[in-house]
Amino acid sequence: MTEKKPIVSIVVPVYNVENYLDKCLQSICNQTYSKIEIILVNDGSTDNSERIMEKWSEKDDRIIILHQENSGLSAARNKGLDKATGDWIVFVDSDDFISDNYVLKLLNSALINDADLVICQYDKIDQYNKIHQIIQSPSGMYNSTDFWSLFYSKSSGESLVVAWNKLYSKRILKEIRYKPGILNEDEQILYYIINESKSILIIPDSLYFYRIDRPNSITNNVKNNKSIRIDFYKILLERNLNFIKNSQFDFALLCSKDILQRLTSELSENTTEKNWNVFWKVFYKVKQYIKVIKKKDIQVDWHLWLYLNFPKIICKLKVYRKSIKYFIKK
């Protein structure tokens, strides 16, 4: 008897990407693994994206089109997840594209290694279709503890957080959904996904192509915003609190250090009164968490100790260093 092939659901949120959608859908429909369902979630597009989706659905009966009023990326992914019938789930952003063997490679890797989360590497594609390779995350098998150790190490790489370079067992996402109405939804959901993952496999293959420098993309709009976003730090603080609640104090300390490093670096870019106010809100929240950790007779390292005791000096040093670099370049 021939073993039944598992179905892989590919969820694609779509919003005003008429210039990129054909390339994306062609790469999905051309997959060498054919047992897929392609769920396109039209998030209230006002350009020709809907017509392009309909054109492709006429050519490929594996395509399912869902519609919703513009509600954002999280809501679109959730709608796709609710509809998915596959044993495995993949997300693809509609301005990106994937290699022809993307699904096959990820699925075979999962089945051979008994992994319920598989992460591949990816390449960045600029507006001139030039490929920019990223720092890769070390390949290998990880449990959740190993994953967080890697995540907060210098070897972390750029592939660990994002949703779209991964194959998920449907079991992982059975109860988990993206939080609607926020940016950095991948950061927010990451703790819960890793907590549900029994075995995580990182493979060395670059199979996903992530488009950068796209006008009006969420990523570019965030980069151009020089204000410190309190909502982003609330996500990191939520992760920190989860570490503490689950007695993962070593990771709570690493998370605290990561927050303060990011925070001081962002402040050095723009030292407005508004940014300082956000800085102090986040800083004092981190200090509260550190007090809880210290009650467990756990000591902070010297690096974190400096951030906690001399935040103003560190901020000023980073501003000074940035100014020196600017004048050297000139």
Image (cartoon, rainbow, N blue to C red):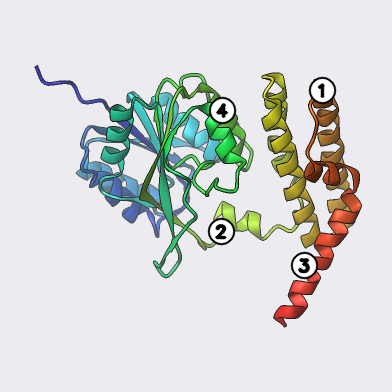
Q: Is residue 232 left or right of residue 298?
A: left
Q: Nearer the viewer, mark 2 or mark 4?
A: 4
Mark 1 / mark 2, whichever is N-terminal: 2
Crowd around label 3: few <14 · some 14–19 · many ≥20 (10 Å): some
Q: Which residue is mark 3?
A: 322
At label 3, the amino acid type is: Lys
Q: Is residue 161 left or right of residue 108?
A: right
Furthest-bottom residue in this view: 330
Residue situated in front as seen by the camera: 168 or 71: 168
Crowd around label 2: few <14 · some 14–19 · many ≥20 (10 Å): few
Mark 2 and mark 4: span between their CA atoms? Answer: 37 Å
Mark 2 and mark 3: span between their CA atoms? Answer: 28 Å
Residue 145 numbered mark, or none: 4
Question: Is 90 situated above or below 208?
Answer: above
Residue 297 numbered mark, or none: 1
Q: Which residue is mark 2?
A: 216
Residue situated in front as seen by the camera: 34 or 182: 34
Tag 1–tag 2 contact (CB < 8 Å): no
Which element is circle 2 on? Answer: loop
Horizontal and vertical percent for residue 171? 42, 20
